[in-house]
Amino acid sequence: MREKLDDIREQALGSIEDARQSVNLEAIRIKYLGKKGELTRILRGMGKLSPEERPVMGQLANKVRGDIESALSLKIREMEQIALTNRLKEEAIDVTLPGKKTPLGRLHPLTTVLNQITDVFLGMGFNVAEGPEVELDYYNFEALNMPKNHPARDTQDTFYINENILLRTHTSPTQIRVMEEQAPPIKIIVPGRVYRSDAVDATHSPIFFQIEGLVVDKAITMGDLKGVLDIFAKKMFGEQTRTRFRPHHFPFTEPSAEMDVSCVTCGGSGCRICSNTGWIEILGAGMVHSRVLEYGKIDPNEYSGFAFGMGLDRIVNQIYGIDDIRLLYENDIRFLRQF
Amino acid sequence: MLVPIKWLKDYIDLDVSAQELADAMTLTGSNAEGVMRLAVDIEKVVVGKIIKVKQHPNADKLLICEVDVGDEVLQIVTGAPNVAPNSYVPVAVDGALLPGGIRITAGELRGEISQGMMCSASELGLAQLGYIDNGVDGILILHEEYPLGMKINDALELDDEVIDFEITSNRPDCLSMVGIAREAAVTLETSYREPEIVLDPGIGNIDDEAKVIVEDPHLCSRYCARVVKDVKIGPSPRWMRRRLAAAGIRPINNIVDITNFVMLELGQPMHAFDIDKVAQRTIVVRKAEQNERLITLDEQARDLTEDMLVIADPEKAVGIAGVMGGYNTEITPGTRNIILESAKFDGGSVRLTSKALGLRSEASSRFEKGVDIINVERAIDRAVQLIQNLDAGTVVEGKIDVCSDDLAPRIIKTQWKKINRLLGLKLDRDEICGILEALSFKAEIVGDSLKVIIPSFRQDVEGVADLAEEVARIYGYDRIPMTLMENSVALGSRTREQILTNKAKNVLAGMGLYESITYSFVSPKVYERIGFEPREHPETVIIENPLGEDQSSMRTTLIPSILEVLSRNQNRSIEVCKVFEISNIFIPKSQPMTELPIERLTLGMGQYGEDVDFYSLKGQLEALFSVFGFGDEIEFVPQLHPTFHPGRTAGIMLSGRKLGILGQVHPSVCQTYSLDDNVMLSELDFALMLEQAKTEKQFTRLPRYPAVTRDLAIIVNKKVLASSIEKLIVDSGGKILEGVELFDIYEGDQIPEGHRNLAYSLSYRAWDRTLKDTDINHIHDRIISALETKFEAQLRK
């Protein structure tokens, strides 16, 4: 009997080992362990054994059953593993095929850069103010210390609606509007569209965007003007950026300055973009003229301030290396998609 | 302002290069826009002397010259007729380079050796520099003797450099060589010199020769005149022509050149009249008469208006004050006696006149910024001195000087510490006074107070801020320490509207739309293009002086702009294009405009492409509305609009107010814009959306009990709008009806003609319990019977 059991064990384990499909395993289980299986049949012969042999054989038979069962389950697990591996292999896809199209548009580069600039100034405590695009001559020129027939008016070719109404040539009129409405301290930037009757070419557009800035408080100095605009330049163009302030003239500021930044392209060593000067002119600025403060109903003996204005289009072009301002207003999707 | 370095050196000793000067001046306030070399690309052109001239044996029109160029004598064949022995001429020797890259080599002309070329002024690129003596074809004959073989650049001082300074409108004093020299001297910490004006008193008496009457002293605060008799009109000397030309002024004749020379040297424009053509030898400065007409020096007839100031004699106008002289009194080769004018005209008046006439001149650009009243007299003396030096006429003794202005200098009194306070500096009193003195101010500090005497040429300096600028620019803007207004702390933020606008832009971009930015002015013809009848054209804000008619009208709608963008993209073979823009439109309040128009922020959306239809755009709008917190407040109603397809257009209402429009563009409008059909467009009153936006959010507890879903399919006439069916379901459903969703629309087989099948999924839920069939059945039945009664709907089972 012992030999028989050993034989069964050997046979069963052998055929489990050889089995290739799970149905085969089921057949093996039935053949050896089923109710009519070989092991059962042998156990039926237990009655013929002596009482001493019975427990020994019973133990052996159980061990054989156990061995077969664990070999079966091991084999099943192994087969499942193989099946899974095969399935996964079959399910493999070409991951280099393009993804499903998810529509995604873009903000206009003018908006994107305006938001960046705005964030820099928000961080320094500025609010964002707005003013009308169709403006009174009074706010656009007169209250900015450019009375009728002032020669500086010639530097801003103006679209007129009539004698008193025009399309604003800069965002500066909003300075006066804000000062009229609000007592110092004032810290604002004013982004917006402005208009000049320049014929269109690669560097001129009759419509472009400006960002104005105005600070009015007690004891504001030209050092503050430099400090704030230097931070702005570093945040916009990179920490390595240097700034240079040159004397200039604007009727609404005194002293006045233009700010250059070290050329973004060459870092200041001189290249085609900066005409070999190493500097790019970015904005005009100055201490608010006392007469402008008075027009804004602010006492120049008590308060001082600085103002600045920059062309957004130029900065956008500088940042992205765009060489033709007209592209900004054509709205070709292939252009807009790049930003 | 073009400043030739060699001329500038008359007034200042320079030991820096032109570029270094330009850079330094830029940092003290005279922005140099560029440094140019006068003559470039000339090599191996030297001074030669013609020794012998003989006829070419084989050609009638050619001459053979022997020309001594110092170390050798060359044989040169020429076609120029103006060659003569002993003339000094420029000679391009073998291998010479002329402007435009032209190489000259030795060769043969009709069998005779020619070892180079004698050059004309134009061949040397000097024509524009006033070197044309002998016509364009003639050889340039040098009128002075030079060492033979000397480089022509050296002989003619062509190796000059010219700095182009951008002079701001507040500094007319820098529109002169002396003014630039003054600034350069302060910049380089050296000194400069004014021209020394010493002249013969002249003969005779001015009062016998001329008279000046200034009728309008407000517009002419000073008028100086001198008379010169027996003038010899001819070319001015080469040095003067060369300087004028290098500074961008065309040389004309000695008298005119002298007036221009003085203008460039001292900044005071001058004019010379032929006094024999001035009636009664009397100059009258007066306003122009109505319908008065004058032919100016450029031979153009000018119609004058009563606000313009003219120079006249008792009979007629002879010049437009400060702008241009009259043709009738022009200096001509036959002129014998002249009267010189040096005056100060009102800047505003000159500007207005020159603008109105469209006539700008070197003179007007100086007058309109304001000339120095003291300089008026100096300039006329300088001109007379030059006339004497050049022996161009006999000066009459004395001058007429009609001056109505106080010539005493202005004085500014302030506290000197204010300068430091404005600049953020800690300069001591000596530093401040030192800088001001260097700039020709007289400055005195006593205690806290600063007293500054302003030189007459600095009319722009009016107050302490101007003085601070003077100090700062010479001290150096770069030396002002940077600070960050630490005492002025504030919190910055965008407004609610700005935040919402940005959010809308981001949401739209997230849905696949591109933001466009287009011009705010359009052609007045756009309304025709978008299908409006003439009577439907709105009132617009019209630009008086547009760049062109197609950019003359401020837009009242974004629709044409959006259509342009779509059209441009389709024309460039872009297959799908979805754009939006949020910009102002402009609505006049009255016509003619007496007050500013309404500016209304407006959202335009437009799209074409494969997956684009009415409902895709509507879906985007609904998503945007949900971001603004709009739900039931929004209503879409069928609408007619000339731009849109009559059956595929919805008006959009927000809480009963008109918000905008959405629809498919009318095929004929598409055609006008060269667009294929199937273009979707929407325009919304974005300002209204901002005003009505619900930005405050409130949490609603999540339901604890499950919802029960029942489907409902009805066959109903197509004319019944989906929105009214849904409204009826909601109204009949009561509180426990939580949601209605249309999930299928079917027309065709088994559905009667003109009808459609709509299938809804209704979900019911109670907050406090799980609903049983008995809770729902009677409500569901109520909905069905309402639909049957109101819309004759048939329940589909």
Image (cartoon, coloured by chain):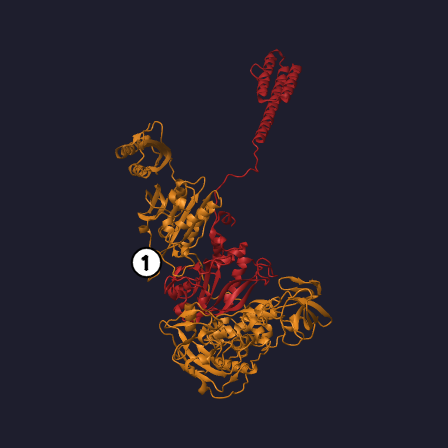
Chain colours: A red, B orange
Residue drawn at x 36%, y 47% is B531
Horizontal and vertical percent position of residue B555: 38, 54
- Residue position marked by numbered label 1 in the rendering: B589
Quarter of the image for the C terminus of chain B: give it.
top left
- Relative to B789, is B435 above or below? below
Residue A44: name its quadrant. Answer: top right
Compared with residue A294, is residue B721 higher up or lower down, i.e. above or below?
A: above
Instruction: Answer whether residue B444 is visible to the viewer in this image.
Output: no
Instruction: Name the residue rendered at 52%, 49% in the picture.
Output: A338
Residue A285 percent location from the top left of the image: 49, 66
Q: Nearer the viewer, residue A169 or B583?
A: A169
Q: Residue furthest bottom?
A: B204
Q: Position of residue B458 (x, y in %)?
A: 48, 76
Taking depth in this image into account, of B135 and B552 the one nearest to the observer is: B135
Check the image and name the residue furthest to the left: B789
Q: Is residue B284 above or below residue A230?
A: below
Element carrying mark 1 = loop
- Could you classify mark 1 by the number of other residues whose Cα lies within 10 Å: few (under 14), some (14-19), or many (20 or more)? some
* Type of amino acid at the residue the image marks with label 1: Lys
Please tell me which residue lies in front, B140 or B556.
Answer: B140
Q: Is residue B251 visible?
A: yes
Left or right side of B262 for B716: left
Residue occupying the point 44% across, 79% down: B277
Q: Measured from the top left, where is residue B786 in percent x and y?
A: 27, 34
Q: Chain of mark 1?
A: B
Q: Quadrant of residue B588?
A: bottom left
Which residue is nearer to you in this view: B752 or B217? B217
